[in-house]
Image (tube, grey):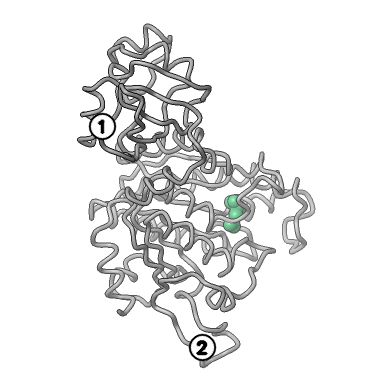
């Protein structure tokens, strides 16, 4: 299949798209100034996606590249920054980055919100539910979340380090259908095309193996993280989550329109759909740390694809926190499914058997109506 045919088939069906924008596209390497004209035309592309009924999330780098110019002695220097300098630069630059995005999107009547994430927010199931719910709520309100790593609190060991992987984790977390990585090249080649004029373009990747990894050149770590190595890793994360990923050239104006119109690109094709892949991820989690026993009505509801409500719980066992994996059992104690629970064991026990409207009065806070959302529940057996 040509990359254009893949674009048409993958993007036509997409309802949620993550677009990753790197520092090298957004910030002028020499002056440290924002490429405002480029950003404004990208906002037009996002408006185009929105008009196609696609919900968009942007993962934008650029905080460090924008902020470093204001660090003493670093303005025009190409020297590598120390970790604390990167963090200080990110703290400065993130303010500007968010405001540039706001201005560009507002021009197209689009609103934005800033989300800063750390690996714990996407990796730990507990925090993951919060970040997923926040982003989904923003998307439901027609807002375009602009995500970056929370660089100022990240340490060397605890950081994504590059926004390719962050973007893939975000795509996984929100069950996106397509992840678009805007790069400085139109995809993967059999060798680095700058040094090998006979290098072959690869329109589609269906398996991520050592041969593919061997084709990836090193990253330009000074200015921005990433390179093909992290893009391939992002492809692995995204496709496992049921999300197709495309690497396309973002250097020209309107790169997403160009992609839709048939620009060359490399597609990493997922085999499963995001909801199915999410269930595999949940089922593949660690052992359940608690058990919820349901009444017959709730067992029937779950088996017909509904969420678990507090009223259907008759017993809660084990020590667990919100976001942990629990087993769900029928009244006879037979496991019928597993899911990520929205309440701690303590709070779940207090609301067991109650109507959703009573939760606030009992717990003192307005929790979710769904004790386990249908999206976070995998049925393992039928009774
Ligand atoms: N989070 C970093 C920034 O905003 C960039 C990381 C990356 O370039 O991948 O500057």
- Name the residue rendered at 39%, 23% in the picture: 292
Q: Position of residue 344 (x, y in %)?
A: 48, 21
Q: Quadrant of residue 75?
A: bottom right
Q: Position of residue 284 (x, y in %)?
A: 46, 46
Q: Position of residue 346 (x, y in %)?
A: 48, 15
Q: Nearer the viewer, residue 109 or 373?
A: 373
Q: Is residue 300 above or below residue 93?
A: above
Residue carrying label 1: 302
Residue carrying label 2: 199
Q: Nearer the viewer, residue 103 or 82?
A: 82
Q: Is residue 199 above or below residue 359?
A: below
The outermost residue toward the bottom is 198
- Name the residue rendered at 34%, 76% in the picture: 3
Question: Do we see residue 313 in this rendering?
Answer: yes
Circle 1: is it few (<14), some (14-19), or many (20+) Cα within 10 Å?
A: many
Position of the C terminus by quadrant: top left
Looking at the image, is mark 1 or mark 2 earlier in the sequence?
2
Circle 2: is it few (<14), some (14-19), or many (20+) Cα within 10 Å?
A: some
Per the image, label 1 sits on a secondary structure element best described as helix
Inter-mark Cα distance, 1 to 2: 53 Å
Q: Quadrant of residue 362?
A: top left
Per the image, label 2 sits on a secondary structure element best described as loop
Position of the N terminus by quadrant: bottom left
């Amino acid at each position: 299949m040509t990359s254009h045919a893949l674009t048409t088939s993958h993007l036509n069906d997409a309802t949620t798209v993550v677009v990753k924008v790197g520092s090298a596209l957004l910030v002028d390497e020499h002056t440290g100034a924002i490429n405002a004209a480029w950003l404004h035309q990208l906002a037009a592309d996002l408006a185009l996606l929105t008009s196609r009924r696609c919900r968009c999330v942007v993962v934008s780098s650029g905080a460090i590249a924008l902020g470093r110019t204001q660090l003493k002695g670093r303005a025009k220097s190409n020297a590598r920054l120390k970790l604390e300098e990167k963090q200080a630069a990110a703290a400065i630059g993130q303010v500007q980055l968010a405001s540039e995005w706001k201005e560009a999107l507002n021009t197209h009547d689009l609103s934005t919100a800033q989300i800063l994430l750390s690996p714990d927010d996407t990796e730990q199931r507990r925090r993951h539910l919060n970040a997923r719910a926040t982003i989904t709520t923003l998307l439901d309100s027609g807002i375009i979340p602009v995500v970056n790593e929370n660089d100022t609190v990240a340490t060397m060991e605890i950081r994504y380090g590059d926004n390719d992987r962050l973007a893939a984790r975000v795509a996984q977390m929100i069950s996106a259908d397509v992840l678009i990585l805007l790069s400085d090249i139109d995809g993967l080649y059999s060798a680095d095309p700058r040094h090998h004029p006979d290098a072959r373009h690869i329109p589609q990747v269906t398996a991520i193996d050592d041969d593919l990894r061997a084709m990836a050149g090193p990253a330009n770590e000074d200015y921005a993280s990433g390179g093909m190595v992290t893009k391939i890793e992002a492809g692995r994360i995204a496709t496992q989550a049921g999300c197709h990923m495309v690497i396309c050239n973002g250097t020209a104006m309107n790169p997403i329109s160009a992609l839709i119109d048939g620009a060359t690109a490399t597609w990493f094709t997922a085999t499963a759909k995001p909801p199915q892949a999410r269930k595999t991820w949940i089922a593949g989690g660690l052992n359940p740390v608690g058990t919820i026993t349901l009444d017959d009505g709730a067992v029937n509801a779950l088996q017909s694809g509904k969420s678990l409500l507090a009223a259907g719980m008759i017993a809660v066992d084990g020590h667990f926190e919100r976001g942990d994996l629990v087993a769900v059992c029928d009244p006879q104690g037979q496991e019928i499914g597993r899911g990520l629970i929205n309440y701690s064991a303590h709070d779940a026990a207090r609301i067991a058997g109650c109507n959703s409207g009573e939760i606030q009065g009992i717990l003192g806070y307005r929790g979710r109506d769904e004790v386990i959302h249908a999206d976070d529940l995998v049925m393992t057996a039928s009774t």
